[in-house]
Image: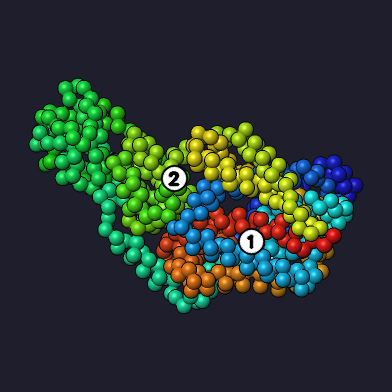
Amino acid sequence: MHSLSWIISTAPEIFLLMAVAIGTVLGRIKIRGFAVGTTACILIVAVLIGQLGSFTFPALLRVILFSLFVFTIGYKSGPEFFASLSIRTLSQVALALVLGVTGLILVLLFAFALKLDTGTASGLAAGALTQSSVIGTASGALAQLGLPKDVLEQQEANIAAGYAVTYVLGYILTLLFVPFVAPMLMRIDLKQEAKKLEAELAGGEPPKTQSLHYRKFQARAYRVSVAAGRTVSSIEEEIGHRTVIERIVRRGTDIQPTLDTVLEADDDIVIAGPSAAIVTAKPVIGTEIDADEILKAIPGNVLDVLVDDRRLHGRSLKDVASRVGDSARGVFLRALTRMGREVPLSADTRIYVGDVMTLVGSTRNIERAAAQVGQVLRSGDRTDIAFLTAGITAGLLAGLLSVKIGNVALTLGGGGGALIAGLVCGWLRSRRPTLGAIAPAAQQTLSDLGLGGFIAAIGLGNGHAAWIAMQTHGLQLVGMGLVVTVVPLVVATLFAHHVLRLNPVITCGALAGAMTVDAAVTGACEIAESKTPVLGVAVPYAVGNVVLTVLGPIIVAATYAS
């Protein structure tokens, strides 16, 4: 026992990393498709380990860890958040705001009616509204009040207890509400509505560019005979299916292919496009030839392109293809993903900033088309550490600003400041692709390690007090958590259906996004037997991350009594 106490006092970081490791593994375990999640598991494991002794971590460590997490969240959500401030997506923004404000009102009502302390109220909001970042922003706001050490530690312990008791319940209730209860409240059959939406999306007339639609892509070489004297545009139009003449070799010299270029006999040309179309090109052009050298000069590629042009936000795929115009020649859309989930494709599918298009075609053509919609995602991009640290620095400085409301200073704190800085930096990155690269894998690492380490430090440092608080107020917290989770979801559902008149399938996806519960989207897709609920996730998710995160300082300002 003496050895254990010595390790705890000498190297508490060992137990912090241990809590992150064990909690992450437990959070990935699925029972009948359900997983508790890594954040809740890390906190529970940390609280349990915290019973072994007294753990002390410097405040600086927690500030850095949480700042890394919340800055990354802002960085990822920035382009979508600022693009969501648009008339085309205003209804989805309104849904997220109604849900967040309703949750805040309920938490404050419970706090005043039951005389909850600030820490317990903040933990209730963080868990019941399934937004872990509230823990950090509330803790940061409390830290700026100049409280005695023992009082601050007790408040942090109450935050941890409130979160630990209510998060799992809130998560499960959201998973059940979105696919099952929301359709009942709207009096619809989610599966039937999804079929109707799919029919509507597929019902529009395809644009001339056929929405960049994808079929198996390849290139073949032909020697011109039948097509002699005809222009490139007339040949491409006759073959159809958006085939494109990529290269013309005339007597050993490359000729730049344009729509007005006239083909001559014995020209060697390369046709690229869907396999089914170009294999039938022989009667139109001439004899297919074995020309490896010509074909090698036309490298095919598959590239992911991040949509970051705000002018495209909320527009249909048909409109986007029309805007891209001739730049889309020879480029095909193979997939569209949103929040990591594939979106059903049709001419009327809406595109949002933050979506990822998987484009197929020659490298040259993809690069040309990508410039019109966003930036190519390259796995080899390195993280711009200077940009990352400068952004967090600016956020922490902004977090020091405060406004006096009575005896309480209302402040974003370091966490809220880092979130705002992340939003701005993410938006700047979308405007200037050469500035501030943070590779997607690095973003995920910073987010997971930052939040996991911060939560573990909270649990370990306040383990004893949190455990006592959970035992003392557990049943009361469960009851309040149930109300704070379900009532905002009910209000948001009815508001979206009766006031905003949102499509019910989109509403289900938007509810999951506003609560930032990714798994609820999967549940809705499974019940709907369709990917269409994904269409409503992106904007509410970005807005929800911001709105719910800033609840921490608001609750502290409203409930703290000096």
> Which residue bears the numbered disc 2?
309
Q: Splitting the image into 4 quarters, where does residue 358 fall?
A: top left
Q: Position of residue 348 (x, y in %)?
A: 35, 58
Numbered marks: total: 2
Q: Quadrant of the C terminus?
A: bottom right
Residue 41 in the figure: left or right of residue 231? right
Q: Position of residue 208 (x, y in %)?
A: 25, 50
Q: Which quadrant holds residue 3? A: top right
Alpha-carbon span between mark 1 and mark 2:
31 Å
For this rendering, which residue is in front, 324 or 485? Answer: 324
Decide which of 383, 220 is in the foreground and name it.
Answer: 383
For label 2, the crowd category at 10 Å Cα-Cα, with few meaning under 14, some 14 to 19 and many 20 or more, is some
Write the residue at 67% across / 40% down.
394
- Where is mark 1, residue-wise? 130
- Mark 2 lies on a secondary structure that is loop
Label 1: state its secondary structure. loop
Q: Amino acid at mark 2?
A: Asp
Residue depicted at x 44% and y 58%: 88
Q: Is residue 163 rendered to the left or right of residue 56?
A: left
Describe residue 292's horizontal placement relative to residue 395 as left or right: left
On the question of residue 404 being in view, the answer is yes
Q: Can residue 52 be seen at all in this image of the molecule?
A: no
